[in-house]
Image (spheres, rainbow, N blue to C red):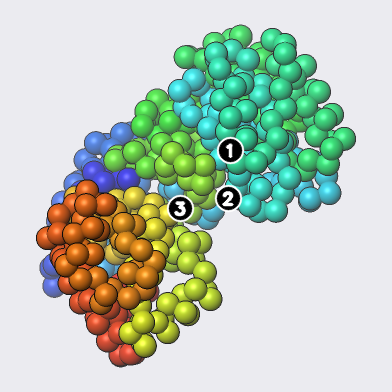
Amino acid sequence: MLDRISQKFTDIFRDITGKSTISEKNIQDAVDEIKITLLEADVNLRVVRRFVNRTIEEATGEKVLHAVDPGQQFVKIVYDRLVALLGDERQDLNLKGPDTHSVILLMGLQGSGKTTTSAKLALKMKKDGRKPLLVAADLVRPAAVKQLQVLGDQIGVEVYTEDTKDSVKVVKNAIGYGRKNSFNTIIVDTAGRLHLDDEMMKEIKKISDIAKPIETLFVADAMTGQNAVNIAKEFHEKVGITGVILSKFDSDARGGAAISLKSVTGQPLKFIGVGEKMEDLETFYPDRIASRILGMGDVVSLVEKAQETIDTVEAEKLQEKMISATFNLQDYLEQFQRVRKMGSMDSILDMIPGAKGSIDAADIDQKEMIREEAIILSMTMKERYNHRIIGPSRRKRIAKGSGTAVFDVNKLLKKFEKTRLMMKKVVKNKKYQANLMKSLGI
């Protein structure tokens, strides 16, 4: 996610923050590199010019040149400018109270991930305590209705469908059905096409007039860069949108669409798709994304992801086990599974300050993690709770059952013993913990 642009900014900042004093020429050189980086990231040219001019204006004054740490002051200015460009603050959905219905209209071109995004948004609404209804109004793309039904079953959200080709009729009847059955959030998946055309716009306009949506969200493919921005602008001019959802954001190494959208369309980026799972739709936080783009990590999001997967009571029990040295292989296995729930190793490294560029996800042997998990799963519960009973014959059986070698089983057991001892020391040593947290910027 944002790998290319993030690495470029990291290199630029490393150079300028390494200087004890900086001149206007240093600043101009850094800004020139930033300009090239943004253009290579497919950021809108007008947006780049505005960003560069404001940055130079703020960075060439006495505030930076005579600061105690001028390099860090310059970085702060770039960060603030980037946050402003991305939209300043997060923009929540403007929904009505739970006792009345709110219609959310989703639109976009074919291939943007609109139908999947509709289901992801419905799941997010469900987790927020609302009662969503999905409306299958994409009657143009073959199998779009069936796809939404499958996704609806997967997340436990009802999908309204009709055997007709009249999408306006479907939406009108769906809203009546939603009111009658106390659905307070109605999410309409409209038809997209391969390119903008008058027919599509007329259909969406009719649907919008009938549905009277409180939110009209344009779903754009982050991978298409400026093309996504230009199409979003055209949709806004012809239909009117209240926000944008960027799908496939996890595959975007450049970030041009995210950086340009707010300035070009005037409408906020509200959500980003960060994976293929239904849970992989995140609220867009300009400050957090700015931190990721500039290679500073995103500790807040990392902590939130950890909190989603680790129960407080379980965490306390785990800490007690570490202190008393009763941490076992079953606990070790569960930690593997919790880390996997947090996302890919790439996405986790994105959020750790200083990790981007210095740690490669490929260097973390994920194949070994899978192999270790298979070995533990081949053990009996008795063996997982007491690894000391695993003698030569048991090791041979475990290796055979996991499709590995006895050498791999021995290696895991040695590693586990070392890990257990290290955990006990870390938990007991509060000073060490404090220093570790400080080094991570938490």
What's the CA distance linking mark 3 and mark 1?
31 Å
The x and y percentages for residue 274 are 42, 44
Residue found 41% across the figure and 36% down from its top: 248
The numbered dot on residue 286 is 3
Q: Is residue 284 visible?
A: yes
Q: Earlier in the sequence, mark 1 or mark 2?
A: 2
Residue at point 51%, 61% (across, down): 308
The image quadrant of residue 416 is bottom left
Amino acid carrying label 3: it is: Pro
Are discs 3 and 1 less than 8 Å apart at CB? no
Query: As rendered, which of 276 and 15 lies closer to the eye?
Result: 276
Sequence order check, earlier mark of 3 and 1: 1
Residue position marked by numbered label 1 in the rendering: 154
Q: Please, which residue is most extreme toward the right here? A: 180
**Residue that numbered label 2 is attached to:** 91
Residue 136, horizontal then vertical, whole percent: 66, 24
In the rendered structure, which amino acid carries the disc numbered 2?
Gln
CB contact under 8 Å: marks 2 and 3? no
Which element carries disc 2, helix, strand or loop?
A: loop
Observer-nearest of 277 and 38? 277
Residues at discs 1 and 2 in contact (Cβ within 8 Å): no
Report which quarter residue 376 is drawn in. bottom left
